[in-house]
Amino acid sequence: MAVKDRKEREREARRSQILQAALDVFSEKGYEKTTMDEIAERAELSKGILYYYFQNKEDLFYELIAREAEKYYTSAYELIKDVNNHREFFSRLFQFHISYFQENRKLLGLIFPFGKSSPVFTNDKIKDRVSAIRNPILKKVTELRGEEGIVMFEFFWSYIIGLSVKMEQGHDVKKESELFQKMLKGVLK
């Protein structure tokens, strides 16, 4: 049993090594210009090992996005799961989003290069997987505001996407962030 557990840990460590290398290369060169050879080189592995874990570049990219989305939404949910009002819900979620992507800037260019036209939002396979991951957050906002909470969340999320695109383009979003925080305090009733 111990050998089987060790092999599984080694397999997961290798997979993580590949995904980290992919994040680095994709964020530097973009999806289109990145090759499996470059990812293999960055991971210090043979290209054959990459193909053992991932069928092709597209599968590797979408697994990377799904892994990062899971980290994001799991962390976000931990911050809002005990919140009892929608203003606090949106305020915490907003603050989390800004700080998360300030600390994980490499992800901005992968997830928000073109807003809703990003491959992340247009590929049905990844869209369905990300939707399932963010479902607990939608359930929470529904608990707080009913069906109206979903509409509020979609509006909120549209703003977040726009702000994220600006961050990815290198703009300082401090003023927009402060204004949005004020709006959250005064507009949401």
Image (cartoon, rainbow, N blue to C red):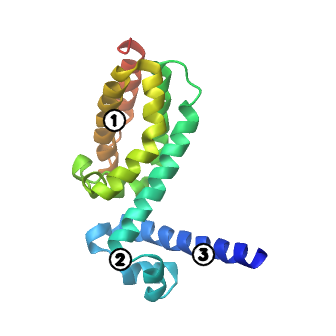
**Residue type indicated by callout 3:** Arg
Residue 82 place in picture, x, y as percent: 59, 27
Question: In percent of the image, x 41 and y 24: which residue is there?
Answer: 181
Say few, some or many: other residues with alpha carbon within 10 Å of mark 3 (under 14 / 14 to 19 / 20 or more): few
**Who is closer to the viewer here, 130 or 18?**
130
The residue at which mark 2 appears reads as: 56
Question: In percent of the image, x 43 and y 86: which residue is there?
Answer: 47
> Is the residue 82 above or below the residue 63 in the image?
above
The residue most toward the left is: 117
In this rendering, which labeled residue sits more in front, label 3 or label 1? 3
Question: In percent of the image, x 35 and y 22: which residue is there?
Answer: 147
23 with respect to 74 (left or right): left
The residue most toward the right is: 2
**Who is closer to the viewer here, 140 or 92?**
140
Contact flag, marks 1 and 2 (Cβ < 8 Å): no
Q: Taking the image as drawn, is residue 103 in sight?
A: no
**Residue type indicated by callout 1:** Trp
Circle 3 SS class: helix
Going from N to C along the chain, the mark reached first, 3 or 2, is 3
Residue 46 place in picture, x, y as percent: 48, 88
The residue at which mark 1 appears reads as: 157
> Is the residue 113 above or below the residue 44 in the image?
above
155 with respect to 45 (left or right): left
Q: Taking the image as drawn, is residue 127 in sight?
A: yes
**Residue type indicated by callout 2:** Asn
Q: CA distance from mark 3 to mark 1?
A: 36 Å
Residue 118 place in picture, x, y as percent: 26, 54
The residue at which mark 3 appears reads as: 11
Q: Which quadrant: the C terminus?
A: top left
